[in-house]
């Protein structure tokens, strides 16, 4: 059952081939069997069975939506009523939210089954899932390598079929990079397409939730439920949501693909370049035209990001002070001690590093030189994309510089780690939608192809990804031992 | 040496919205601690602020009233600092792009009008309260107030004395209540003041170093705190010392200010635009809609009262200091069809005195405008004299009866029947021949004696004008 697509699962449930309870139990068994992957922080077995029973009743009544009875899992950054939401941090190891994130609420309405909460880098800060308080997640393709991050648990769980599909969030590549490393399809929607309410903030102007699934077809079904305006999120956009499944089979004839020369420079690993070239050739065969574009400011994306994101996080994470919820140090002697030790003991190294960087960048005397300048660069980068997207319909490129790296390989070198996101970060700064689809293997490790579109063209991106997946089978591969 | 004082005020007004500035929780005062704080106010993880449009509307009303530029584009920023009653570790405020720009307010001191500049007014959220009593050495946190909308109104350093500062504060207090944007309740903290005070030798151009006095919450304390601070600074300088830039706290019990923190200890608030909120865009349509519904402002109302009702400066000023008082006046006048002057005198005189004595506001007056109008009508049509009216007024204050009921019940109807008055006068003249002689020999003062006698005989109910006229005629023989 776990190899079936969402459409096939929905069909199986509707035609009575299996019940939601059976399907859910099957996934729960797999989660237990493969718990050494460490993909889940919390498995909500009882809730899952209850959800499945309710879904079965709904199926009998015929009140069915595409996700009714389908077992899914949430990145542990989405707040869930009465279920622990840790955000991968010791700080929130004891935190149970009194509300559901809007996204979670939507899945509940749709009748999806809640399997549990997925591992992640602490507060979504990391590119390898190694910063999690709950330990590193292993990549199902090679358990000595990382699944990517910060949505590493989501990437591993979908890849190893420990959930039919999952949610992720992407601030600088946190959906696309683990999707690439785990050989699945991950979409970061346009900023404002999916509500951020109840999604614990890392960098508010960049964070965006999105689907992580086995195929573009599945991602379309997931996004359909996630997307839409939310009055509780002022930055969500009040724009109608198209039917994402409807246009999947549209022709790609005449599609204009742009390849930024800055992405395909000599710095790009030659194996990676070869895989991308093969993938782009498939698109040529599907009728697309390919041309080179230039985005001269792309090289500034990493420094700009590492000012803006830490600046926002330094304020976003101030609420974790040991006063009202979350971790509190033992026997504080006074207020300053309460703050210092609660935060000092509750946060991990990478989180502290980013809070410090952000605090510095916003300080009097440095604000103009760092924060204001970074915002200017952000505008330049957005303009680069806007200009390029007048010449072409989509931009394609790598997701990551290399396939998944080894656990422990980069964790001691933050700069090296930050460079893992060199191809994804600029897209967040511009607020554009982008997805990662499997495009082959290097040394038995999956590599991803990134497709970047104009604002609110998720439907077109999914169509482009789906057409590729009709002529290739990279997305059908399952890691050994998880078939 | 002669010294000049420079004062600027920052006034925090709580805007009279039903719900908080970024959440749906109620803003009502006095609830059980932490019962009016929702997930957003508590700063729980993942929650997001959504701007209350009503707070924007009230800020724009204020901006229009002080003839300020309303920013078409204003931005919320995060002001970062740690404090237990600040749930998010930052306050959402406005920094570089406030909603209200440069405006002004005219004050009157010692008969002179002075224009005080207003630098800006910006929207922000209030913090919660830290309660240090009754927690056995610990601190209790009440977050009911967290997220209450505030409009911080920052003046130019245009005031030169504590008296001017108080006049400005009173004028502003009057204005925000007039506009209905703030209840002005200072005891509940709806209207709070910080004062920036410095001194300089008279004639010097540069400002001296200023000290900021925090949270002075009554007009009386503002005057005392500023005067105390002026004295402190002058004494310090004259003794060879230097004023340091610092924040000071006023202790109303000891009547002194003391240092809270120096400039060096001051927080670096690390302001930056709040990415959770979009910039506030205000278009002409929004503004003109507000403008159309803007209440008449005190100055305009005062002018109208002077022209339309022929009131003197003093009455017009008193009646227009508060909107409810002005409304009461106009409502009374409309019902009574009495002389505006008479109506103004009763409201600014007897009624105000009685209210003051009882510690009541006009809105809580035991005498409704209808009942006062009933009294004025009987004065105007000569049913009762001014003196009797005072007696009726007392009854009105004590009971719920109308003036007519009181007059009828107590038999206070004025006697205007000349025959009745004449017969009494004749009797008095007959009984007091000695005084008649005195009057006729030129002692005019005795006239008052006769008036008194007649009124006494008639229990005050005689029409005084009529008594005067008849007495004069009869005494002159």
Image (spheres, helix red, strand yellow):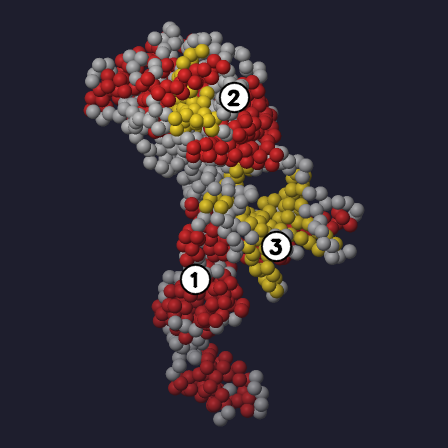
Q: Is residue B393 visible?
A: yes
Residue to which mark 3 is pinned: B165
Look at the numbered disc 1 and give the secondary structure of its residue.
helix
Residue A145 screen position, x and y as percent:
48, 11
Q: Are marks 1 and 3 in contact (CB under 8 Å)?
A: no
In this rendering, the answer to whether B246 lies above or below B333 is above
Whole-Å distance between the Cαs marked 2 and 1? 77 Å
Percent across and percent down for residue A281 are 39, 19
Horizontal side of B378 relative to B251 (left or right) equals left
The residue wearing badge 2 is A265
Label 1 crowd (10 A; few <14 / some 14-19 / many >=20): some
At x 61%, y 52%, the residue is B156
Nearer the observer, B433 or A207: A207
What mark, if any, has residue B327 been given in the picture? Answer: 1
Residue A198 sits above or below residue B441 on the image: above
Q: Could you tell me residue A33's position as x and y percent?
A: 37, 8
Give me the residue at 71% from left, 43% from top.
B244
Q: Nearer the viewer, mark 2 or mark 1?
A: 2
Could one spot residue A209 in this view of the protein? no
Q: Nearer the viewer, residue A87 or B386?
A: A87
x and y percent of residue B367 in the render? 41, 62
Would you call the spot at circle 3 few (<14 residues within 10 Å), some (14-19), or many (20 or more)? Answer: many
Task: Give the residue at x 49% y 46%.
Answer: B73
């Amino acid at each position: 059952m776990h190899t079936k697509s969402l459409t096939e699962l929905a069909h199986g449930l509707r035609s009575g081939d299996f019940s939601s309870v059976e399907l859910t139990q099957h996934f729960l068994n797999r989660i237990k069997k493969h718990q050494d992957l460490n993909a889940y922080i919390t498995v909500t077995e009882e809730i899952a069975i209850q959800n499945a029973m309710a879904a079965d009743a709904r199926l009998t009544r015929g009140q069915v939506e595409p996700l009714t009875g389908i077992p899914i899992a949430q990145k542990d950054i989405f707040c869930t009523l009465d279920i622990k939401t840790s955000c991968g941090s010791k700080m929130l190891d004891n935190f149970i939210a009194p509300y559901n994130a809007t996204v979670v609420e939507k899945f509940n309405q749709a009748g999806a089954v809640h399997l549990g909460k997925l591992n992640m880098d602490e507060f979504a800060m990391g590119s390898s899932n190694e910063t999690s308080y709950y330990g590193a997640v292993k990549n199902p393709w090679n358990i000595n390598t990382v699944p990517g991050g910060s949505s590493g648990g989501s990437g591993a769980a979908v890849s190893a079929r420990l959930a039919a599909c999952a949610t992720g969030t992407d601030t600088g590549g946190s959906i696309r990079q683990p999707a690439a490393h785990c050989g699945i399809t991950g979409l970061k929607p346009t900023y404002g397409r999916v509500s951020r309410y109840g999604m614990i903030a890392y960098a508010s102007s960049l964070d965006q939730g999105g689907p992580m699934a086995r195929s573009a077809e599945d991602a379309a079904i997931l996004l359909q439920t996630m997307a839409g305006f939310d009055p509780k999120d002022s930055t969500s956009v009040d724009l109608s949501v198209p039917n994402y499944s409807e246009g999947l089979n549209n022709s790609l004839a005449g599609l204009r693909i742009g390849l930024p020369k800055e992405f395909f420079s000599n710095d790009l690993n030659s194996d990676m370049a070869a895989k991308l070239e093969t993938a782009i050739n498939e698109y040529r065969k599907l009728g697309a035209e390919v041309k080179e574009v230039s985005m001269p400011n792309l090289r500034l994306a990493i420094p700009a990001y590492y000012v803006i994101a830490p600046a926002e996080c330094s304020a976003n994470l101030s609420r974790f002070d040991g006063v009202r919820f979350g971790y509190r140090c033992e026997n504080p002697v006074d207020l300053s001690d309460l703050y210092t030790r609660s935060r000092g003991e509750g946060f991990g190294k990478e989180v502290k590093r980013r809070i410090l960087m952000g605090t510095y960048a916003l300080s009097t005397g440095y604000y103009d030189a760092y924060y204001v300048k970074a915002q200017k660069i952000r505008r330049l980068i957005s303009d680069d994309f806007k200009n390029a997207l007048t010449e072409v319909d989509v931009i394609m490129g790598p997701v990551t510089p290399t396939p998944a790296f080894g656990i422990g390989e980069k964790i001691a070198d933050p700069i090296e780690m930050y460079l893992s996101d060199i191809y994804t970060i600029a897209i967040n700064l511009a607020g554009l939608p982008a997805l990662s689809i499997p495009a082959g293997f290097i040394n038995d490790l999956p590599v991803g192809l990134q497709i970047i579109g104009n604002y609110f063209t998720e439907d077109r991106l999914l169509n482009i990804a789906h057409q590729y997946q009709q002529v290739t089978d990279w997305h059908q591969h399952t890691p050994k031992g998880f078939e | 040496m002669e010294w000049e004082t420079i004062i600027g005020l920052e006034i925090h007004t709580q805007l009279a919205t039903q719900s908080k500035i970024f959440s749906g929780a109620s803003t009502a005062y006095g609830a059980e601690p932490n019962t009016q704080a929702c997930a957003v106010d508590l700063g729980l993880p993942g929650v997001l602020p959504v701007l209350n449009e009503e707070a924007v509307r009230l800020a724009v009303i204020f901006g229009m009233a002080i003839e300020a530029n309303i920013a078409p584009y204003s931005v919320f920023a995060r002001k970062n600092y740690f404090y237990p009653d600040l749930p998010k570790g930052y306050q959402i405020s406005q920094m570089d792009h406030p909603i209200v720009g440069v405006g002004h307010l005219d004050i009157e001191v010692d008969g002179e009008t002075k224009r005080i500049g207003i630098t800006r007014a910006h929207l922000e959220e209030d913090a919660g309260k830290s309660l240090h009593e009754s927690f056995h050495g610990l601190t209790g946190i009440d977050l009911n107030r967290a997220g209450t909308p505030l409009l911080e109104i920052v003046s130019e350093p245009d005031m030169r004395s504590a008296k001017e500062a108080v006049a400005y504060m009173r004028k502003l207090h009057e204005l925000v209540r007039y506009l209905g944007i703030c209840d002005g309740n200072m005891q509940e903290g709806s209207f709070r003041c910080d004062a920036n005070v410095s001194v300089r030798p008279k004639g010097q151009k540069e400002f001296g170093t200023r000290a900021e006095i925090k949270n002075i919450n009554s007009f009386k304390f503002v005057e005392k705190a500023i005067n105390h601070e002026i004295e402190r600074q002058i004494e310090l300088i004259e003794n060879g010392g230097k004023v340091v830039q610092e924040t000071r706290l006023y202790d109303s019990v000891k009547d002194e200010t003391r240092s809270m923190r120096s400039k060096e200890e001051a927080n670096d608030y690390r302001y930056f635009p709040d990415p959770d909120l979009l910039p506030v865009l205000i278009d002409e349509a929004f503004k003109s809609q507000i403008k159309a519904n803007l209440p008449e402002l005190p100055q305009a109302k005062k002018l109208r009262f002077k022209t339309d009702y022929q009131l003197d400066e003093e009455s017009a000023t008193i009646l227009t200091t508060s909107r409810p008082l002005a409304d009461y006046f106009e409502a009374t006048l409309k019902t009574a069809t009495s002389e505006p002057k008479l109506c103004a005198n009763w409201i600014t005189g007897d009624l105000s005195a009685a209210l003051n004595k009882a510690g009541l506001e006009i809105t809580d007056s035991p005498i409704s405008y209808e009942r006062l109008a009933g009294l004025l009508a009987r004065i105007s049509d000569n049913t009762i004299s001014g003196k009797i009216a005072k007696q009726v007024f007392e009854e009105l204050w004590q009971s719920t009866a109308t003036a007519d009921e009181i007059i009828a019940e107590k038999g206070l109807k004025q006697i205007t029947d000349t025959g009745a008055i004449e017969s009494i006068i004749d009797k008095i003249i007959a009984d007091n021949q000695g005084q008649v002689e005195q009057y006729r020999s030129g002692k005019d003062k005795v006239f008052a004696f006769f008036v008194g006698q007649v009124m006494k005989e008639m229990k005050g109910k005689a029409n005084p004008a009529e008594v005067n006229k008849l007495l004069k005629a009869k005494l002159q023989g």
